[in-house]
């Protein structure tokens, strides 16, 4: 291969490999302008390496030129800030150096898709520049085979943690890059060998074989072992803004304004849906608070920067909502609806900007740094949340942190509701029904949620009394401890003409289902009767209430709760033990299983018995045992022979083995060891045993291996004492009516 042709191949491979590496960020950025930021330095460095490779000491000139070009090139293609005469200013290049350090953390701190402008556009530029800088020179300025591959592999390893959790076609992209780099290194190695003096130009058979092998192995592994569990994938984390959620926790409920009661005005909200302020997904001993990282969110449940577009977690119908704030609204939380897909704050010159918003995808809530400006106006598009559920809808299995360990104090009060025969969702609905039936509601400002408030003073009281916020806190914590992930949400109903005042503010509970969606449990399902209406709800013990509800549900009179048939008594109490028919069936199953296991062990026991008989030290005993093997085979196949008969008579009854019977008699009654070998006699008996078993039909042949009849007969002989050993063999075998059996 000529030098020019080899350089062309090297340039093409580096271009294609870097394009494939950077394409992993496709799901991270909103459009593919980021490829311009990443591929321009790749092309520039390749051209520079081609020129420098033809110059003496070109490596030094190449490195110097690359260092000089770094700042202006980054300002032009990444920051897109050309100065006078298209030359970036020193201020712009100085800012580029400072932003380059924070660019990766800024990118991973932003909810995708990210607009490829500003600081985040430096990430593909840095990857392309610093991967190509060594790769281009090692490929074009040296003949090393593997050296240029290393920077490209490092670039791949650095790009994956910067992307989303599950990039599209990550495995096929990785396989393609691997095949490309392996083939390239093989071609370069062959090129180097062919250029050596006295070497014949090598063929492409070996590189092609390598490529095909890597492709087949990668494809088979990807097919047989698919990467379906992404929970252990490593992603870089952004900068922790720890005061963010905790600082906004004090304004999860907007304070009641002193003057105007109107908080804001919203248009485009579908009927029956509420606007969300804050999501409280972590219970502490002081109460429910918004978590810095949402429990069970697997890494995406943190407050991050957003661009103009946001990728929703679940598909669905979208709506556009327009909100205009009023002086009565004083909170850090931006009113939202559903899962955000885009937001427009361009109407707020000099006030709240998109850069001030931090959005949590897991909780679908947004915080504004410095608080929402009462003069703000904005619009957003979002996916309408899923509403409603039935008892058949499967709920998600809560992670350890979603069970809210700080709420363990509630377990003693929840014991009557934690019935094993019920689904987790049915337990939650049973608790909600108990609170609604036995509770009183005080409409006042009281958000105390300590263990004493929710435990002893509410659920532990004979008559549950609390504010709506406390009811929501108790309901969410009880659901979490009963096996359904739950959280508290603050928000507001939208009044007539979209006006929202302080009287529309409320709280509710959301439950997480198996598909990952959060669905509301409306306050009407767990709030008690108002105190000011003079209501006097029935006061019943939780255990009696649960039993009464399950007694009605077991009759098929309840659409929400339906315990399995036979799991409760007539009064609704749990069945103390299993029904008699279930116990009898279990005993039968155990006995049948034990019999099957015993039958399966019979061939093994017979094999061990045969080996023990073969190892006898008495020459006469080997003849006795060999013939006994023949008799046991006849018994197991279903044609037993009387043990009291002589061996000749037994052979005639079997219809085979007459010569063996006579050899056995001659050996047993002989004064000393016979002339023929005992091993031959044993092998002949084994052949006869196999022929006897093979002579019967297939069903009886299989049964002969599993039939324990010969084992039972052997145990009976031992009990009678017929299995003596030693020198008495020949004496006991002298009578035709007293045939010596084997001792097993």
Image (tube, rainbow, N blue to C red):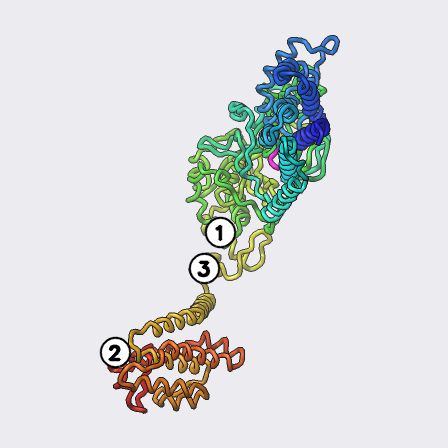
The magenta stretch is 164-168
Q: Is residue 587 left or right of residue 83?
A: left
Going from N to C along the chain, the mark reached first, 1 or 3, is 1
| Labelled disc at residue 575 | 3
For the C terminus, the image quarter is bottom left
Q: Which callout, 2 or 1, points to the residue nearer the camera?
A: 2
Q: For numbered disc 2, what is the local secondary structure? A: loop
Q: What secondary structure prevails in the magenta region?
A: loop
Residue at x-position 38% and y-position 73%: 610
**Residue 88's spot in the image, x, y percent?**
69, 11
Q: Nearer the viewer, residue 652 or 164?
A: 652
Residue 586: give x, y in percent of width and height.
45, 66
The image's mark for residue 443 is none
SS of the residue at dot 3? loop
Q: In the rendered view, would you say 251 is above or below 546? A: above
Examine the rendered structure and indicate whether residue 217 appears above or below residue 81. Answer: below
């Amino acid at each position: 291969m000529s030098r020019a042709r080899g350089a062309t191949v090297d340039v093409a491979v580096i271009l294609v490999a870097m394009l494939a590496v950077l394409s992993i960020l496709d799901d991270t950025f909103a459009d593919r302008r980021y490829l311009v930021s990443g591929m321009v330095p790749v092309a520039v460095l390749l051209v520079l390496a081609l020129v420098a490779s033809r110059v003496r000491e070109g490596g030094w000139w190449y490195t110097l030129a690359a260092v000089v070009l770094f700042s202006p090139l980054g300002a032009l293609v990444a920051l897109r800030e050309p100065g006078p005469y298209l030359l970036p200013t020193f201020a712009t290049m100085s800012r580029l150096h400072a932003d380059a350090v924070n660019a990766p953390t800024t990118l991973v701190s932003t909810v995708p898709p990210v607009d490829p402008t500003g600081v985040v556009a430096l990430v593909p530029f840095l990857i392309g520049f610093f991967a190509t800088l060594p790769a281009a020179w090692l490929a074009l300025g040296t003949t090393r085979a593997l050296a240029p591959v290393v920077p490209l592999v490092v670039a791949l390893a650095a790009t994956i943690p910067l992307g989303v959790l599950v990039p599209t076609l990550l495995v096929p992209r990785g396989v393609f890059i691997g095949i490309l780099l392996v083939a390239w290194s093989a071609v370069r190695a062959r090129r180097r060998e062919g250029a050596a003096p006295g070497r014949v130009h090598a063929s492409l058979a070996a590189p092609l074989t390598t490529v095909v092998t890597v492709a087949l192995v990668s494809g088979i592994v990807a097919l047989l072992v698919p990467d379906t569990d992404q929970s252990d994938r490593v992603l870089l984390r952004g900068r922790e803004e720890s005061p963010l959620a905790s600082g906004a926790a004090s304004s999860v409920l907007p304070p009641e304004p002193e003057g105007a009661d109107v908080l804001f005005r919203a248009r485009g909200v579908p009927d029956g849906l509420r606007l969300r302020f804050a999501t409280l997904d972590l219970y502490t001993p002081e109460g429910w608070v918004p978590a810095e990282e949402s429990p069970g969110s697997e890494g995406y449940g943190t407050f991050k920067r957003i661009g103009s577009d946001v990728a929703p977690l679940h598909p669905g119908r979208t709506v556009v909502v327009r909100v205009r704030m009023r002086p009565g609204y004083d909170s850090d939380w931006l009113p939202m609806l559903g899962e955000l897909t885009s937001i427009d704050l361009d109407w707020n010159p000099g006030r709240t900007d998109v850069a001030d918003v931090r959005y949590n995808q897991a909780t679908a809530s947004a915080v504004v740094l410095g608080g929402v400006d009462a003069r703000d106006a904005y619009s957003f598009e979002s996916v309408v949340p899923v509403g409603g559920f039935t008892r058949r809808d499967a709920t998600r299995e809560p992670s350890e942190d979603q069970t809210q360990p700080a709420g363990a104090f509630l377990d003693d009060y929840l014991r009557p509701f934690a019935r094993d025969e019920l689904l987790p969702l049915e337990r939650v609905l049973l608790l909600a029904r108990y609170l609604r039936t036995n509770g009183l509601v005080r409409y006042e400002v009281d958000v105390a949620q300590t263990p004493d408030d929710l435990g002893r003073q509410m659920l532990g009281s004979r008559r549950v009394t609390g504010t709506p916020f406390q009811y929501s806190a108790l309901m969410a914590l009880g659901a979490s401890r009963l096996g359904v992930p739950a959280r508290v949400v603050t928000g507001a109903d939208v009044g007539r003409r979209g006006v929202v005042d302080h009287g529309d503010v409320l709280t509710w509970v959301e439950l997480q289902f198996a598909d990952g969606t959060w669905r509301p449990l409306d306050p009407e399902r767990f709030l008690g009767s108002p105190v000011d209406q003079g209501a006097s709800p029935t006061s019943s013990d939780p255990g009696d209430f649960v039993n009464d509800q399950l007694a009605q549900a077991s009759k098929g009179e309840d659409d929400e709760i339906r315990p399995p048939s036979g799991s409760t008594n007539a009064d609704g109490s749990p069945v103390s033990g299993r029904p008699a028919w279930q116990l009898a069936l279990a005993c039968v199953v155990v006995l049948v299983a034990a019999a099957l296991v015993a039958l399966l062990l019979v061939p093994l026991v017979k094999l061990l018995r045969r080996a023990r008989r073969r190892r006898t030290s008495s020459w006469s005993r080997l003849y006795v045992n060999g013939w006994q093997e023949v008799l046991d085979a006849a018994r197991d196949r279903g044609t037993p022979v009387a043990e009291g008969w002589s061996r000749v008579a037994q052979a005639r009854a079997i219809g085979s083995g007459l010569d063996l019977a006579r050899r056995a008699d001659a050996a047993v009654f002989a004064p000393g060891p016979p002339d023929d070998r005992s091993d031959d006699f044993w092998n002949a008996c084994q052949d006869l045993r196999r022929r006897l078993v093979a002579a019967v039909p297939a069903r009886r042949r299989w049964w002969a291996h599993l039939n324990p009849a010969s084992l039972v007969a052997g145990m009976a002989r031992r009990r009678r004492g017929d299995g003596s050993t030693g020198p008495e063999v020949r004496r006991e075998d002298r009578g035709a009516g007293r045939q010596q059996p084997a001792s097993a």
